[in-house]
Amino acid sequence: MNAVIPAAGYGTRFLPATKAVPKEMLPIGNKPAIQLIVEEAVAAGAERVVIVTSPDKPALRRHFEPDAVWHERLKNKPEADAEMFRIEELAKRISFVDQLQQRGLGHAVLQAEPALRGDKTPVLVLLGDALVDGSEPCACELARTADEVAPDASWVGLERVPMERVSRYGVITGDQIGANGRVYRVSGLVEKPSPEEAPSDLAIAGRYLLQPVIFDYLSTQIPGKGGEIQLTDAIMRSLEITGVFGFRYSGKRHDIGNPQGYLTALTSINPTILNS
Ligand code: G1P
């Protein structure tokens, strides 16, 4: 599979920290959040990783660039230099594309299409501000479940949220299937409904595994909620063609795009995530 990481947002919820440092570069232990997310994608089997960013955020590209100056500086410190080599290994799979206008999550994902053109493998989408802590990396658990249940369908990662918070999320209608109580056959998706309109408390939560036909739907997607091109709407339109399933993953998601969620992540995340 391939992976797309939307990371073009300005991080306004996190100002002033994000004035000069992109929110994806804020550290979780010794690694910037974006590196943990790339590592999760690679652990799940992503061969190519497209990071959708903005020319205003050069630090993301800079982080993954090979750097002879650092190697020279660390020539007597092999352990530290190993971290540099580790980044370079990841970087072999990474390409960057820019989203020049902020037109919504669906529009951001669509920007990755030229970099993946012609590839018929599923697309793992990992939101740059969602870090998931669990015994198995979230994308691995999602990909494994998809493989076991319906490898030809599109999948959304789910989390139960209190009804008063559903209006912050995409929400699904679905029937639970299978023995473990975590898999749902999805019959509808709606972006940011009011609690009164929401069909359930099952929110789409930062991870997707989509069939590549999603790019066709995104390229003709009209703006939806908030005047933005919504990924949720394009998945809804593809439902009849690919089938859509939901997976209520077992890890705990941290919204590291706001200071409170970031602090909670720092204090509660399992340190083994840093050694993956
Ligand atoms: C996006 C998606 C939404 C999803 C949410 C959390 O919204 O559009 O469907 O539930 O991420 O993963 P955003 O938080 O970017 O407004």
Image (cartoon, rainbow, N blue to C red):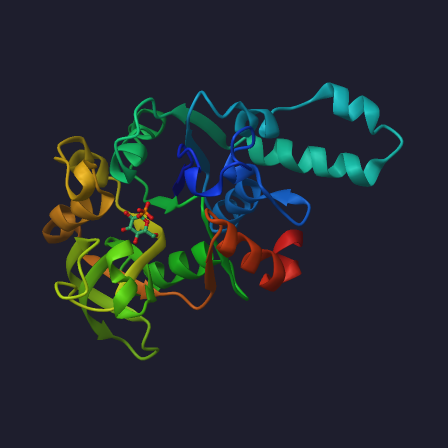
> How many numbered marks have been drawn onto this rendered protein structure?
0
- Between 193 and 152, the one lying in front of the other is 193
Image location of residue 20, percent across then percent down: 55, 28
Q: Name the side, left or right, on which 201 lies relative to 3.
A: left
Image location of residue 254, percent across then percent down: 47, 57
Q: In percent of the image, x 51 and y 46: which residue is there?
A: 37
Q: Is residue 227 visible?
A: yes
Q: In percent of the image, x 32 and y 67: which residue is there?
A: 161
Q: Name the side, left or right, on which 40 lies relative to 213.
A: right
Q: Name the side, left or right, on which 105 lies relative to 142.
A: left
207 up-or-down from 95: above or below: below
- Quadrant in the rendering for residue 174: bottom left
- Between 275 and 107, the one lying in front of the other is 107
Residue extending furthest toward the right: 76
Q: Quadrant of the N terminus?
A: top left
214 up-or-down from 117: above or below: below
Image location of residue 242, percent across then percent down: 17, 51
- Quadrant in the rendering for residue 79: top right
Q: Is residue 276 visible?
A: no
- Between 125 and 256, the one lying in front of the other is 256
Image location of residue 43, percent across then percent down: 52, 50
- Quadrant in the rendering for residue 118: top left
Residue extending furthest toward the bottom: 179
Q: In percent of the image, x 25 and y 31: which residue is there?
A: 103
71 up-or-down from 11: above or below: above
